[in-house]
Image (spheres, rainbow, N blue to C red):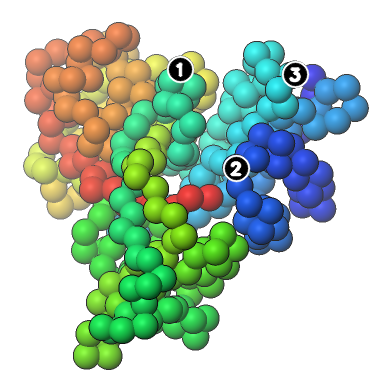
Amino acid sequence: MHIRKLAEMEHGKTRSLYEEVFSEDSSSFIDYYYSEKTKNNTIFVVEEDGGIQAMLHLNPYTLMVNGRKEPSHYIVAVATREKYRKRGYMAELLKEALRSMYKEGEPFTFLMPASESIYTPYGFRTVYEQEHRYLSETECGGNGIRLAEEKDCEALAAFAEHALAGRAKVYAERTPAYYRRLLKEYRSDGGNLAIIEEDGKICDLRPIVTEAENEKPKIMVRIVYLKRLLQILELRCLMAACFHVTDPLIEENNKCFLLTGTEFSGVMLMEGKPENSEGVLTVEALGSLIFGSKTVEEIAAEEGVSMTERLKGELEKIVPLSPIYLNEIV
């Protein structure tokens, strides 16, 4: 088994594996993916027996987190050829990807799991269920509803960025380039994007799809560069907490942290002294708390977590990174 990062010119070599494992995707969507998304993504592969037998794609996004631009990658297209499964390839690809993202200083990564149980052992936790409000083609063409065009992308970005900044603490930055690519994505699968206007101004956007999904896809998050993530956080009031974090996959996250700060300063972070620590938190438990999917009391009951009552009270002062709006597909 040999793991390596493909050069951009080699990305097309993974298409046959994509088509084999994700056979439900249309050929037109796969054409879009390999002509558009793989232009600037990162692909790690496992080579065995003279060919690519497993892969993992990292698709780059600029996320807005508490009003700050932060680099991140969406983990997609995690796949292994059937005869090469149950050899630990996926685990090794995930570890390699996490190390790469840590070196880039990314606070966290995210993915849409085929099954949550696959990724839970690697520190991922579910923090969001995607919300898609679809329109059908028959609903377009009247009542202030029309199909989006490339010339609309600048206005779409301005509208969406303003709307999301007011309602979400974590979302993908909206830019004209974001919408130009999104239009290609929808159209590749027979869909489109509808603009809803009132008095000539955009008031909503809705995807147009040929077949609406009833399920709400889940999004899981995994802390990558913990120090950076902690520095982004906001506080409710004066705080001082010292605790140890355990992370079996990213060695650099295993340390004692001292968090201080106020609602005005945000988090001021220092390396804590182990003798002053008031508890131990697993990286996944801390992630659940930070992204608002669990309370302090809930994570305190998890395996590998211990904390004093005082520490529990101090951790309550962290303002969760919630609501979240990560509705991207790839």
Q: Secondary structure at mark 3?
A: helix
**Marks 3 and 1: which is nearer the front?**
3
Circle 2 sits in a helix, a strand or a loop, which is it? loop
- Tell me if residue 33 can be seen: no
Give the alpha-carbon distance from disc 2 to disc 3, as whole Å.
19 Å
* Residue 32 in which image quadrant: bottom right
Residue at 80% x, 32% y: name it: 52
> Pointer 1: residues within 10 angstroms few (<14), some, or many (20+)?
few
Residue shown at the point (11%, 43%) measured from the top left: 236
Counting residues from the start of the chain, the first of labels 1 and 2 encountered is 2
Please tell me whether residue 222 is drawn above or below residue 131 in the rendered image: above
- Residue at the image point whose x is 90% and y is 27% from the top: 50
> Label 2 belongs to which residue?
24
Q: Which residue is mark 3?
A: 83
- Where does residue 195 sit, x and y in percent of width and height? 35, 77
Image quarter in which the N terminus is found: top right
Q: Is residue 79 above or below residue 76?
A: above
Q: Position of residue 158 (x, y in %)?
A: 35, 76
How busy is the neighbourhood of tag 3: few (under 14 within 10 Å), some, or many (20 plus)?
A: few
- Residue nearer the viewer, 52 or 81: 81
